[in-house]
Image (cartoon, rainbow, N blue to C red):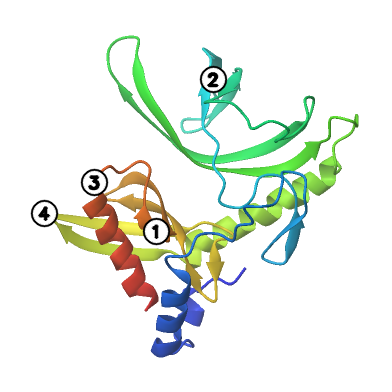
Amino acid sequence: MAVLTNAKRGKKTRSHKRTVAKSLLGKPLKKNSTASYNQHKIHDGRQYTGMRIGGTHKWYYDRGEWKETKVTPDLWRISYSVTKRRAGKAPGGSGAPVGTGYHWFIFAHQVVTKLDADDYSTSLIGLKYKLAHKRASKNAWNVKTTTQRNHLIKFLKTMLSQLENAFVPIDIEYEGKRYKGEGIPIPGTCQDGVCFMLDISLNDEHYGVIRSLKSGWKMDEVKDQKLVDAIGQEIMAYYE
């Protein structure tokens, strides 16, 4: 993955960055719409199976149980168990077989607002990273615990590098209000120093993930498309 760090930024010519930005921003992740779930696909030189890059799932969660215990003034231990159900029906013969297992690492923002003595509104926005999977026909995970740990270390180091060196400063005026903050590139969504998916925070508030598609800039959490466009234009200007 190529990331445009602060140290490397000066080595890129303005014309080169403009060419890369125009060629990459506005393009979705590479797709193979004819490939079935189990066929081998390629992304960024890596072979994989399952849902194609850019695919989307929508789920509904049953009434689950969330438990939390305070460990330090700022750290809590949490556990959550629930059944999730697909919104709609899976196409016949698609998806993983019954009994398949996955081990994910969740890297996310949880924002809550107290509504009354007993209730809070809550939203969870972020990333989940696959550490391992278990095929329905096997009793063991595809990689050992040590390998899972090494994969997690690599992911966290990449995320730390993005946080420290590759953030995109954002400072815009929109409808009489100033929005100032930054975008943190999502690991694996950059090429030649240009990133097309970023985690956005403005005015000390988390806004969600912005992504560049053929149809323009999109953010699921922000309903004002003109504001989303203004943020996207600021990102484009940065990479140009």
CA–CA distance in space, label 1 to label 2: 30 Å
The residue under label 3 is 224
Give the residue type that dot 4 points to.
Glu
Q: Is residue 106 left or right of residue 112?
A: right
Nearer to us: label 4 or label 2: 4
The residue under label 4 is 175
Point 16% across, 60% down: residue: 173
The residue under label 1 is 183
Nearer to us: label 3 or label 2: 3
CA–CA distance in space, label 4 to label 1: 21 Å
The residue under label 2 is 68
Nearer to us: label 3 or label 4: 3
CA–CA distance in space, label 3 to label 1: 18 Å
Give the residue type that dot 2 points to.
Glu
Q: Earlier in the sequence, mark 4 or mark 1?
A: 4
Q: Are the two marked residues, 3 and 1, in contact with CB atoms closer than 8 angstroms? A: no
Q: Where is residue 89 in the image (x, y as percent from the top left)?
A: 59, 26
Give the residue type that dot 3 points to.
Asp
Q: Are the two marked residues, 4 and 1, in contact with CB atoms closer than 8 angstroms? A: no
Q: Which of 50 and 237 is in front in this view?
A: 50
Q: Earlier in the sequence, mark 3 or mark 2?
A: 2
Point 72% across, 35% down: residue: 103
Q: Dot 2, how many residues are within 10 Å of its Cα: few (below 14), some (14-19), or many (20+)?
A: few
Q: Which quadrant would the C terminus be assigned to in this image?
A: bottom left
Q: Which of marks 4 and 2 is nearer the N terminus?
A: 2
Nearer to us: label 3 or label 1: 3
Q: Are the two marked residues, 4 and 2, in contact with CB atoms closer than 8 angstroms? A: no
